[in-house]
């Protein structure tokens, strides 16, 4: 059990007094960036005999070539150790290649997160077409690599066009669930003249219909709650949906390729060549009210204040 959860448990059960608890919290804050997380390298085998190792902490595929094995997971920085073979535990994506993550992609601690949010108070919060708020926590260009705070709330309007929910990214994604719960669904998208879907390209705030018919098949559905994290490889198709009244994630974009355009999957019956999709302006009063609620819940859950 993590130290913070153990301290919170002790506090709730009255197993320690206030002063002792504060001392524990200070020690945990000081050690937060020094503790090394450990995950297992899960060797997965599919029905065809293929497969490879996955990180047990975030499900990141660690590659099947022993000469390219990672001592640490590139997605979540956990030290990975071997732990057996799990036939058919998860569907394996064949022939995938991944690039090791640089030091600039190290995770932000909870303390740093709270301080950064406060430092960005008054900054513009954007509303994503998929129905969640985005607060940039970095100084770079909006589309460049960096950290964002994402928040879903029952107070917000629903996504504008749920039929266009499946998409990929021009960057790798590492998402840490801070509050609530998420369902993340990954898909296999392939060109298919008989396909029931069309491929759209997101450019300049619009969705452009490529007229290319594709098939879109669910590959894996995963559920994550507060304290867990997941990753999405650049170019992989997925969709995410909040399963709680208030969900917040620390969303990290890694190694963005700004020369690329993300792709979106839409219904085959859609005939328009261009769809205006990316107006992210939103009521800032409501947006900050939701963010403030999320911030207070984060403080309660992780900092014990």
Image (cartoon, rainbow, N blue to C red):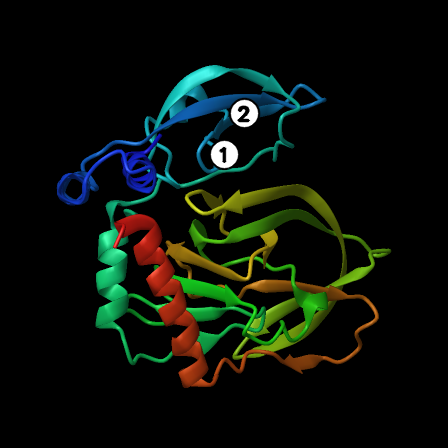
Residue at horizontal 40 percent and vertical 59 percent from the top: 256
Given residues 261 and 51, the one toward you in this image is 51
Please indicate whether residue 10 sits to the left or right of residue 237 in the image: left
Which residue occupies the foreground of this view, 191 or 172?
172
**Res. 78 image quadrant:** top left
Residue 279 lies, with reference to residue 191, above or below; the image says below
Residue 212, horizontal then vertical, whole percent: 74, 63
Mark 2–mark 1 Cα distance, whole angstroms, equals: 7 Å
- Image location of residue 80, percent across then percent down: 37, 25
Quarter-of-image position of residue 222: top right
Give the labeled residue for mark 1: 61
Location of the C terminus (image quadrant): bottom left
Relative vertical location of residue 273 with respect to residue 84 in this rendering, above or below: below
263 shown above or below 161: above
Q: Secondary structure at mark 2?
A: strand
User: Image quarter for residue 118?
Assistant: bottom left
Give the residue displayed 49% in from the left and 53% down from the top: 180
Labelled pair 2, 1 in contact (Cβ < 8 Å) = yes
Q: Is residue 236 visible?
A: no
Q: To which residue does mark 2 refer?
A: 52
Residue at the extreme top: 84
């Amino acid at each position: 059990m993590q130290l913070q959860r153990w301290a919170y448990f002790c506090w709730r059960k009255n197993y320690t007094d206030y002063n002792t608890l504060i001392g524990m919290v200070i020690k945990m804050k000081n050690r937060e960036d020094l503790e090394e997380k450990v995950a297992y390298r899960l060797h997965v085998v599919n029905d065809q005999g293929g497969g490879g190792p996955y990180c047990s902490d975030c499900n990141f595929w660690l590659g099947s070539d022993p000469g390219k094995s990672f001592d640490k997971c590139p997605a979540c920085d956990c030290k990975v150790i071997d732990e057996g073979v799990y036939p058919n535990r998860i569907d394996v994506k064949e022939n995938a290649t991944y690039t090791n993550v640089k030091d600039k992609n190290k995770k932000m601690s909870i303390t740093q997160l709270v301080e950064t949010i406060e430092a960005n108070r008054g900054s513009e919060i954007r509303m994503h077409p998929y129905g969640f708020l985005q607060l940039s926590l970095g100084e770079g260009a909006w589309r460049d690599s960096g950290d964002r705070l994402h928040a879903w709330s029952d107070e917000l309007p629903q996504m504008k066009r749920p039929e266009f929910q499946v998409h990929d990214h021009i960057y790798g994604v590492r998402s840490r669930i801070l509050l609530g719960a998420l369902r993340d669904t990954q898909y296999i998208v392939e060109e298919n003249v008989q396909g029931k879907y069309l491929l759209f390209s997101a450019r300049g705030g619009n969705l452009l219909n490529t007229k290319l018919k594709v098939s879109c098949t669910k590959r894996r559905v995963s559920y994550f709650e507060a304290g867990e994290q997941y990753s999405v490889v650049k170019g992989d198709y997925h969709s995410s949906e909040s399963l709680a009244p208030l969900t917040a994630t620390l969303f990290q974009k890694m190694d963005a390729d700004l020369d690329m355009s993300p792709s979106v999957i839409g219904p085959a019956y859609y005939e328009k060549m261009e769809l205006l999709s990316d107006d992210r302006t939103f009521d800032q009063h409501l947006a900050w009210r939701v963010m403030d609620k999320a911030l207070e819940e984060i403080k309660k859950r992780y900092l014990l204040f």
